[in-house]
Image: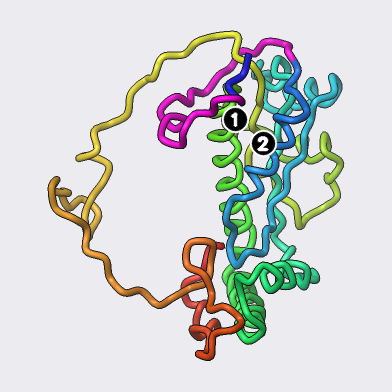
Amino acid sequence: MTRDLHPLTVPQAIRARRSIRHYLPDPVPDRLLTELLDLALEAPSSWNVQARFVVVVSDDEGRAALTRATGGQPHPQEAPLTLVFVAGSQAWREDLSDIYERALRDGAWNERFVSGFSQATQDFQRDLEQRGLLREYAVKDAVIAATYAMLAATSMGLATSPMNGWDEQQVKRVIGVEDRDDLHIAMLVPVGMPAETRAHPGRRPRSRQAFTGRFGHERHEGHEAHVGHEPHQADDAHEAPEAHEPHEPHEPHKAHQTGGIR
């Protein structure tokens, strides 16, 4: 039985999640899979281009092929389904008007902001292209979505395992995009009911992994972090000025200097 009636909180899911290699054959109910996909796609993305996609592989042939593509690892074969997260490095060239129209309709952005933001998006992506970083940025977005999926699955009582060891061309062949140079495999995430229990292997102490100001600088407990006044960027954490506000949006043309994740 899954925990969908009493889902875990985010902190609980983070602490409870383990990478599971063996699964029961029980199918994931459609309603849970739909919710899982919706939650994964709520993940923020660079410039809100949403250049990450999810392919659900659940048929016997596809699962067997993913097992071969991952060097014979058991979880893609045993899990009732595997989520293949795909990054699109050229999605920014496509028509993004539906994204802007949704933000306008929901009152998240106004017309003036969209005008500047859309141009800044193109400028930022062209800069990435010149530096050979389009694939890297798209994959980052897809991995964020995969992380959302794993935590959402854990909250529902489902098990997952992030997989980044595979033959990319073989995985692309499984999902039918072997001829697409603009699409890249970011992560495989088997999903299902666990057939094993795994203990937490532990993490290194915070003092070794988390620092203040500079890498390696000890972080002293009991001191509140100083909150600086960063330039405003419009995302789901910091909303853009609403359409009825008289002041101008905060210079979206400058956003290409940092690359906002929305």
Q: Where does residue 200 sit, x and y in percent of width and height?
A: 39, 19
SS for callout 2 = helix
**Quadrant of the image occupied by residue 72:** top right
Q: Residue furthest front?
A: 244
Residue 36, numbered label = 2
Quadrant in which the C terminus appears: bottom right
Specify the segment rendered in magenta.
5-26
Mark 2 to mark 1: distance in Å?
Answer: 6 Å
Q: Is residue 11 above or below residue 217?
A: above
Q: Nearer the viewer, residue 61 or 112?
A: 112
The image shows residue 69 at horizontal and vertical percentages of 73, 28
Q: Is residue 180 visible?
A: yes
Q: Residue at x 71, y 46 (%)?
A: 86
Residue type at mark 2: give it. Answer: Leu
Question: Position of 242 compared to 14: left or right?
Answer: right
Query: Which color mode does the image show?
Result: rainbow
Residue located 52% across and 89% down the image: 248
Q: Are marks 2 and 1 in contact (CB under 8 Å)?
A: yes
Left or right: residue 50 compared with residue 96: left
Q: What residue would you read off at disc 1?
A: 153
Name the main secondary structure of what is drawn in magenta.
loop
Between disc 2 and disc 1, whose residue precedes? 2
Image quarter for residue 253?
Answer: bottom right
Where does the image place residue 136, in percent across and percent down from the top left?
A: 58, 56
The image quarter in which residue 186 lies? top right
- Which is more toward the observer, 242 or 256? 242
> Residue 229 appears at what percent x and percent y?
31, 74
The quarter of the image holding the N terminus is top right
Secondary structure beneath dot 1 equals helix
As for residue 7 lying within the magenta part, the answer is yes
